[in-house]
């Protein structure tokens, strides 16, 4: 276990002697039974991370809604719901999963810029706590459907504070040019027009400025703007009950030194001293990233004049983050060879794309065909972003708790690839 109070990386993947373990299970035992590619998750790590946020913010008793877009396997959702967490959802499919995981409706918040009428209706029927609304057009849609169902929908307006979160452009959501949220002045006008929405209770503000943010300053800047905005609303007799502060806390992939939950709380809590709002957090990556690895098998070693390639049975179809975000994932052999010399490798997949790589220019112990390696910090935006590209079956997922492990998603079979397809008679 790598865990200290001052260090925000915590996970239960460690070497015992030369062998990589997840909690008390040897990872090689899992891959030999389940095959590769395989996602492997530590139950304990998920629980520990939820508890860290709870503990850090215990003075304000927040509702912690895990952002299930990061990893939505039912076993993981159930683990977190059992710890008292709610869920942050962004689609009808995620609502379906939330219900299957037994998440109480009053612990579900619904975000996303493109909710369909069918999705809104299903969420209203379930009785979710809050919609995070991104535009006036969406507000009108929820009003129409709530009116038809004779329900009162609670709504938070998602504001865009125009703050640079200092993260990758593809995961920055609080800049002025982002598709997410609305400008403060537009939100103000909507609050003043709340009588036009009799079936809605405009009672919250939502702000989420991005993902993988490793410093506190962008959060402080955004939350100060939001609090100034709320104060101005209250002067106009507009009451705010919920403040949803989103997620975005960074984790360690490589050399980052992100703030811990406790350090984040020390910066944020003074802003809310003496205030009576119900605080909501939506952590995703912080909870799940370090809780998972992706294990794969070396198929071939290919040496050229310029490069050594370790060609895996695992590629961008399983883990697209390196291709999409130039993301860094550490590469750990499942069996260390301390006598082996270190080589420089590009670790690449079998997909027919030049962008299919998992790690570039890495010093790793000399690898051979048949060796297994783990791509670390793969518990967030890993399996959920995988695909059947090149007609590759989806990987298996496994959860470890203590000395036991269980398959929590079976590997897709070849015949599953054509489920739902048909060849019409006119072909």
Image (spheres, rainbow, N blue to C red):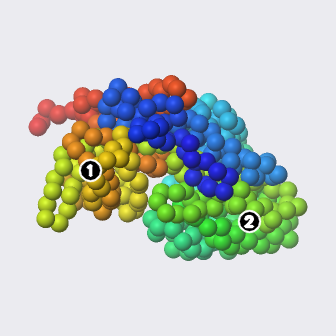
For discs 2 and 1, the disc positioned in front in the rendered view: 1
| Residue at the image position 18 percent from the left and 46 percent from the top | 300
Q: Could you say which is closer to the camera, residue 155 or residue 161?
A: 161
Q: CA distance from mark 2 to mark 1?
A: 45 Å
Q: Earlier in the sequence, mark 2 or mark 1?
A: 2
Instruction: Please state, as top left, top right, bottom left or bottom right, where the N terminus lies in the image.
Output: top right
Residue for badge 2: 267
Q: x, y (%) of residue 49?
A: 63, 45
Dot 1: element: loop
Q: Residue furthest left?
A: 427
Q: Position of residue 322 (x, y in %)?
A: 36, 58
Q: Is residue 277 above or below residue 209?
A: above
Frontmost residue, 287 versus 191: 287
Residue ID for mark 1: 366
Task: From the viewer's perspective, tell me whether residue 201 is left or right of residue 341.
Answer: right
Q: Position of residue 259 (x, y in %)?
A: 63, 61
Q: Residues within 10 Å of mark 2 (few under 14, many from 20)?
A: few
Identity of the residue drawn at 63% across and 39% down: 47
Q: Are marks 2 and 1 in contact (CB under 8 Å)?
A: no
Front-lying residue, 33 or 144: 33
């Amino acid at each position: 276990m790598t865990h200290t109070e001052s260090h925000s990386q915590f996970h239960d993947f460690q070497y015992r002697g030369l062998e990589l373990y997840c909690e008390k299970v040897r990872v090689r035992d899992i891959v030999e039974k389940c095959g590769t590619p395989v996602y492997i998750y530590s139950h304990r790590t998920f629980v520990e991370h939820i508890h860290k946020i709870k503990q850090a913010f215990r003075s304000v008793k927040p509702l912690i809604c895990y952002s299930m877009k990061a990893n939505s396997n039912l076993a993981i959702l159930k683990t977190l719901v059992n710890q008292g967490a709610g869920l942050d959802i962004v689609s009808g499919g995620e609502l379906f999963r939330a219900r299957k995981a037994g998440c109480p409706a009053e612990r579900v918040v619904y975000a996303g810029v493109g909710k369909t009428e069918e999705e809104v209706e299903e969420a209203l029927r379930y009785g979710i706590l809050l919609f995070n609304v991104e535009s006036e057009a969406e507000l009108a849609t929820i009003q129409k459907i709530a009116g038809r169902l004779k329900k009162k929908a609670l709504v938070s307006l998602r504001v865009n504070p125009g703050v640079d979160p200092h993260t990758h452009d593809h995961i920055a959501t609080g800049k002025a040019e982002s598709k997410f949220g609305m400008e403060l002045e537009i939100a103000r006008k909507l609050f003043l027009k709340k009588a036009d929405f009799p079936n809605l209770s405009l009672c919250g503000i939502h702000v989420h400025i991005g993902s993988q943010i490793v410093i506190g300053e962008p959060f402080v800047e955004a939350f100060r703007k939001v609090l100034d905005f709320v104060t101005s609303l209250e002067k106009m007799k507009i009451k705010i009950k919920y403040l949803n502060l989103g997620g975005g806390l960074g984790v360690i992939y490589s050399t980052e030194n992100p703030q811990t939950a406790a350090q984040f709380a020390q910066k944020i809590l003074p802003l809310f001293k003496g205030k009576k709002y119900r605080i909501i957090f939506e952590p995703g990556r912080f909870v799940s990233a370090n809780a998972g690895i992706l294990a794969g098998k070396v198929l071939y070693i290919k040496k050229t004049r310029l490069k050594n390639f370790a060609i895996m049975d695992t590629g961008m179809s399983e883990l697209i983050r390196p291709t999409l975000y130039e993301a860094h994932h550490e590469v750990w052999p499942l069996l260390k060879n301390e006598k082996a010399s270190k080589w420089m490798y590009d670790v690449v997949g079998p997909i027919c794309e030049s962008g299919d790589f998992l790690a570039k220019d890495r010093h790793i112990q000399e690898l051979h065909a048949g060796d297994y390696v783990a791509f670390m910090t793969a518990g967030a935006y890993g399996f959920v972003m995988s695909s059947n590209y090149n007609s590759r079956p989806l990987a298996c997922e496994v959860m470890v708790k203590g000395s036991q492990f269980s398959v929590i998603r079976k590997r897709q079979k070849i015949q599953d690839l054509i489920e739902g397809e048909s060849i019409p008679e006119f072909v």
